[in-house]
Amino acid sequence: MKKTLLEELYRGNLRLDEGIVPDDPEYQDLTQQIIDIMDAWKEQLPADRYEQLETLMELQCQTIAMEAAMAFCCGFKLGAAILLEVVSGKEGFIQGGG
């Protein structure tokens, strides 16, 4: 028996952030540039300084992930509001900006 999306969401099985890797060649190129630059810094910096750089990069990744999650939520709310507006024929489902 196939589960509904709502059931999968309830069970915590919907993880849209897992397994998403853009297939855009520019993404692949940028990723390789980051790897190359980090390798160069690893050779040039003392180990403790390179660890600080890695920590900085990890913190940056965490903030980007938070921003992406917020953008997803705002986009989802907008999509839901558009659907409500279309189905109900009423306007004004968006209050305040998100």
Image: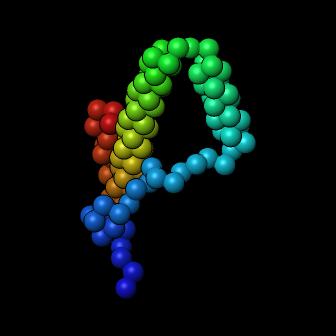
**Residue 21 screen position, x and y as percent:** 58, 48
- Looking at the rendered structure, the number of numbered marks drawn on it comes to 0
Q: Quadrant of the C terminus?
A: top left
Q: Is residue 12 left or right of residue 42?
A: left
Does 13 appear above or below 24?
below
Q: Is residue 98 left or right of residue 68?
A: left
What's the residue at 46%, 53% (across, down)?
18
Residue 89 vs residue 31, the one in the foreground: 31
The residue sitting at the bottom extreme is: 1
Does 14 appear above or below 65?
below
- Asked if one can make out residue 6 in the rendered structure from this viewpoint, the answer is no
**Residue 46 screen position, x and y as percent:** 53, 14
What's the residue at 40%, 32% (across, down)?
62
What's the residue at 36%, 44% (across, down)?
73
Quarter of image, res 1: bottom left
Colour treatment of the image: rainbow
- Asked if one can make out residue 37 in the rendered structure from this viewpoint, the answer is yes
Quarter of image, res 59: top left
Q: Is residue 37 left or right of residue 47?
A: right
The residue sitting at the front extreme is: 47
**Residue 80 screen position, x and y as percent:** 37, 52
